[in-house]
Image: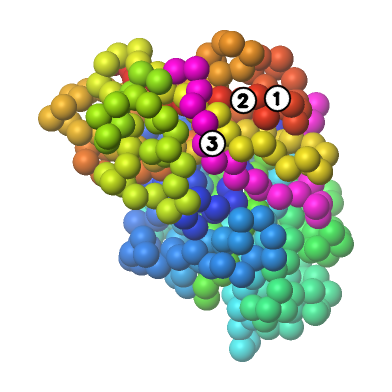
């Protein structure tokens, strides 16, 4: 697997992967750090990105949104690869931290340790600070003061017993910092946690994380990529769930909203093995390559009705249902967002094609 995460923050301008307490510790997911006292409404949608859905996520100053990667880069020779489009304030002096890689401290409390961080400097430069090592600063004038969105990409190999550490930083397609084979690049340690942890607010969209394994989607993408959003646009093969209108007719109309409406329109079932699936919008015809598909779904559980029921997302391809390997634990009477990513078509075990996407159905299955 190469692609580990992508997020356009398109759906209602919020996180595709919300905090999911109760999930296994090795599951990749977003989580708010415990010292982040901002409210969920502080993570607000911004409507000025130049393309895509026109929505970015604003991460507030001193907010701390962490992403648990669910794998150990430090013990391997794989690269950790990151990309995002960001608009940031340039501070009056010093730097404004954009993101950091931190150690996996217990429950993300205030005692976590920053291991490497990326700062926007008041000069428009990018600076990388390495714990126990050196600081690396790019040329000035690469970033503007909350005017333009810039594409930041980062590639890191941890230093361990079998490989020499190295990293690169690219800004808008230009190599800004090259710290290859240096003795003080980030050493192996605790499991990797990525954090959007700004000193002043930043706006982010078209976000991705990948590693260097596999045969595709395993290196810096560069400019030209978009995180697209395909909404349900028709009924799928399965219509076992019942809508709020007390029938199972045109269920896709209950889940196709741009802004979620919680209990106003929905589909539900408490019967084990029930499925509901939906057709999707076509992918734009000028798309050249597909890096992955991520099902985004928002659910809660009525404990009094459905007791211990869980769910599995699934994809229906060429007449076959492909269930996620793990069931998802839902919150009682509390809506949360969840995702299921497939970097390759599970039917062909090859990279997705445009025709694959245009014939795809996605849905939810009830589990005991």
Q: Report if the CB atoms under discs 3 and 2 are less than 8 Å apart.
A: no
- Does 213 appear above or below 194? above
Q: Which quadrant holds residue 55? A: bottom right
Residue underneath mark 2: 360
Q: Out of 351 and 243, give the one closest to the viewer.
A: 243
- Place of residue 272 in the rendered image (x, y in percent of width and height, measured from the top left): 30, 14
Q: Report if the CB atoms under discs 2 and 1 are less than 8 Å apart.
A: yes
Neighbor class of circle 3 (other Cα within 10 Å; few <14, some 14-19, many 20+) is some
- Place of residue 271 in the rendered image (x, y in percent of width and height, measured from the top left): 27, 16
Number of disc labels: 3
Residue 211 at least partly seen: no
Residue underneath mark 3: 233
Judged by depth in the image, the label closer to the viewer, 1 or 3, is 3
- Does 228 appear above or below 247? below
> Label 3, label 2: how many angstroms apart (C-alpha)?
12 Å
Query: Which quadrant is the N terminus positioned in?
Result: top right
**What segment is highlighted magenta in the picture?**
213-238
Q: Secondary structure at mark 2?
A: loop
Q: Secondary structure at mark 1?
A: helix
Neighbor class of circle 2 (other Cα within 10 Å; few <14, some 14-19, many 20+) is many
Residue underneath mark 1: 356
Q: Residue lying furthest bottom in this view?
A: 92
Residue drawn at x 44%, y 18% as measured from the top left: 238
């Amino acid at each position: 697997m190469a692609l580990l995460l992508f997020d356009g923050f398109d759906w209602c301008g919020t996180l595709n992967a919300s905090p999911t307490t109760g999930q296994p510790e090795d599951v990749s997911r977003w989580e708010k750090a415990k010292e982040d006292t901002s409210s969920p409404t502080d993570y607000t949608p911004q409507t000025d990105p130049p393309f895509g859905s026109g929505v970015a996520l604003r991460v507030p100053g001193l907010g701390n949104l962490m992403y648990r990667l669910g794998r150990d880069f430090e013990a391997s020779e794989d690269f950790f690869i990151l990309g995002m489009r960001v608009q940031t304030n340039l501070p009056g002096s010093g730097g404004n931290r954009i993101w950091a890689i931190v150690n996996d401290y217990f429950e993300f409390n205030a005692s976590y340790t920053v291991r490497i961080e990326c700062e926007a400097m008041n000069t428009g430069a990018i600076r990388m600070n390495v714990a126990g090592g050196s600081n690396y600063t790019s040329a000035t004038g690469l970033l503007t003061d909350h005017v333009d969105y810039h594409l930041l990409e980062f590639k890191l190999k941890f230093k361990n017993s079998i490989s020499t550490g190295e990293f690169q930083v690219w800004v808008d397609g230009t190599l800004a910092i090259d710290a290859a084979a240096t003795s003080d690049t980030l050493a192996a340690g605790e499991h990797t946690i990525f954090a959007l942890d700004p000193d002043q607010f930043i706006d982010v969209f078209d976000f991705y994380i990948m590693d260097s394994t596999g045969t595709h989607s395993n290196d810096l993408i560069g400019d030209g990529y978009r995180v697209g959003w395909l909404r349900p646009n028709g009924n799928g093969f399965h219509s076992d769930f019942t809508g709020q209108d007390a029938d199972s007719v045109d269920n896709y109309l209950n889940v196709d909203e741009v802004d979620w409406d919680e209990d106003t329109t929905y589909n539900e079932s408490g019967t084990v093995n029930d499925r509901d699936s939906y057709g999707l919008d076509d992918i734009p015809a000028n798309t050249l390559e597909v890096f992955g598909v991520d099902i985004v779904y928002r659910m809660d559980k009525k404990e009094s009705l459905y007791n211990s029921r869980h769910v599995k997302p699934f994809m229906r391809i060429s007449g076959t249902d492909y269930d996620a390997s793990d069931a998802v634990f839902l919150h009682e009477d509390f809506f949360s967002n969840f995702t299921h990513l497939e970097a390759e078509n599970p039917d062909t075990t090859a990279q997705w094609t445009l025709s694959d996407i245009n014939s795809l159905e996605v849905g939810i299955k009830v589990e005991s």
